[in-house]
Image: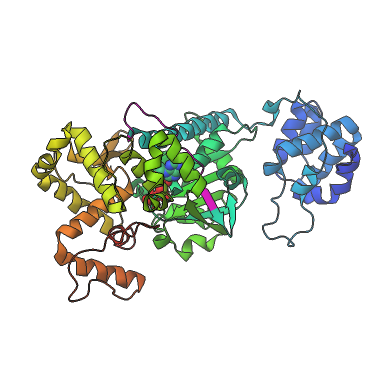
Amino acid sequence: IHQRHSAEGYIGSARRHLVGELKNLSVILENLYQRGVLCDEEVSKIQAEKDDYDKTRKILDSVTKKGEKACYEFLKIIDMTRKRTLERPPLHPGTKTFDLHHWISCFSFKEDTQMNANYLQGPRPCHRYQEKLKSNAKEMSKKFWGESKKLFGGKKKPDLSYATLVLDTDENISPSELLETDKNILLVGKPGIGKTALTHEMLRLWAERESKELDYMFYFCMRETSDIIRAKNLEELLFGVFCEPDEGKDEVLQDIKRHSDNVIIIFDGITDLSSQVVKKVLTKKLLPLAKIIITCRPDDEDEDFLSGDFDRMEVKGFSEQTIKTYLSATLGEDQKKVLSNLELVTLCHVPMYALMIAACFKSDDSPQPCTVTEIYINIVRFCLQINSKTKNKDLNSFISTKKEEILSLAEVAFLATQQKSVNLTNLPCKDSCVLSFLKPLLIKEAVTETITTHAFLHYTVQEFFAALWILKNPDKIRDVFQQYRSRCQLPLFYPSEDAPAQLPRGTPNTVPPSVQQCTSSGSP
Ligand SMILES: Nc1ncnc2c1ncn2[C@@H]1O[C@H](COP(=O)(O)OP(=O)(O)OP(=O)(O)O)[C@@H](O)[C@H]1O
């Protein structure tokens, strides 16, 4: 039950804490002026006070002297600008006794629909930039889901965006809760489990949320590292790699730096800390109050990422219920074929496999794959067929004619995976059909110069081809396992001296088969 307080009394009760803890007094003064609480002269007088202490005292005195209405306006301003004007709540409860954020949230405001939010906004270029970031975020999210939909051909356009479940000590957390929390987050999850999907969902939610607050959200795909590594400072990272303001660059950068608590940055698929700027952001040397979200695979998890204050969470993929909803949206009646096969249903816990399975089963005459390897083979054959417009009956002989090109792609995949990279600087062949597994990656070299490199459509496709290359070069298997063992300090379990040079079949209960496990980034 909220007890109704007088605004004047409410300010009085916290005066001691407000003096000394109010920040960004210029924002408060500007708003008091805009709302007609203080006139020009009063504002100038306050600004002339020697330090923030005295300025705050003077603001409080002037507002209180003007009575209840002015005090109410003041509280309203503090409420709307709290991120900028109040000290952050303590990260460790108990280290600070009075929490101004909590205090202002307890004041019960009357309904006030007349309020003009514009008063509370920052400089115009910052707003224009926020709008640009929001439309970028919407676009990225749309594109992400659009690419999955392409697998279903032109006719069927299922809705593929289901909230990924995140599990943290037995508690499911939704993407919007992740977005709202003030904490820094480390999201760990195996390949294809939906880490990128989750970050794109957060981007979408941020772009669509109705908030009057001026805030910023940035996304970096850490696999596209070269331009990130080249960024020498914060400006080059935020504006050069991600998105440049159309006007008032300096003003925007100033605002971002000054109000870093209004910034959210996602580093998706981090493998190491080779970028100095990224390292500084993670260790809070830059943008100390920004909220940071990192995603990585379990193999790449590194204590250095956590030197800041991060909450670690695991992305667990689809639940039983989500699998059913997903299959029904993508397959309709055909879902029964998948649901009747326990192995396939279990695979669907990994959204990437759910997508592949749904794509494989989408038409009546599709073969029924049962392992991850078979599903990847299906996908590869499916892509080759679509791109070459080959009839089903001719597909095998078509693939035979392309053997060399396919293996050259596999070799490039293997070499890149070994170097923990997705940037393919040299194309393995000229065949457009085989090259359809790649997408161009544009890297800005200079203002007017862009270099085009290539990357696989999805990292797991690169891993599949890398595994294919090992299978075709059995003499390399021992080396690869040896390398894996020395990185992970695991006993060398396979292949033994007399074991056949052949990899075990996929274990379809939860994870990718050994083929992929052995070649995933960090553990080739
Ligand atoms: N919540 C979801 N709803 C529907 N499809 C999803 C979901 N999450 C992931 N997918 C599908 O699975 C694919 C792989 O997911 P994503 O790229 O997010 O995995 P990841 O965990 O980032 O993998 P990696 O570690 O390989 O980068 C996506 O392209 C998307 O098609």
Q: Say if the magenta span includes residue 162.
A: yes
Image quadrant, ligand 1 = top left
Quarter of the N terminus within the rendering: top right
Residue positioned 57% across, 30% down in the render = 127
**226 w.r.t. 169: above or below:** above
Residue positioned 40% across, 39% down in the render = 335
Residue positioned 87% across, 37% down in the render = 7
Q: Is residue 30 left or right of residue 447?
A: right
Residue 162, x across and y down, in percent: 49, 40
Snapshot quadrant of residue 128: top right
Q: Say if the magenta span includes residue 222.
A: no
Snapshot quadrant of residue 508: bottom left
Give the magenta-colored segment's residue range.
Answer: 151-166
Q: How many labels were placed on the picture?
A: 0
- Whether residue 92 is visible here, answered yes or no, is yes
Quarter of the C terminus within the rendering: bottom left
Q: Is residue 510 left or right of residue 462?
A: right
- Whether residue 239 is visible here, answered yes or no, is no
In this view, the residue in front, 306 or 61, is: 306
Residue 442, x across and y down, in percent: 30, 38
In this view, the residue in front, 133 or 145, is: 145
Q: Is residue 27 left or right of residue 430?
A: right
Residue 403, x across and y down, in percent: 11, 47
Q: Is residue 515 left or right of residue 391?
A: right
Residue reaching furthest to the top: 114
Q: Main secondary structure of the magenta part?
A: loop
In this view, the residue in front, 268 or 378, is: 378
Snapshot quadrant of residue 427: top left
Residue 68, x across and y down, in percent: 90, 33
**260 w.r.t. 134: above or below:** below
In this view, the residue in front, 438 or 392, is: 392
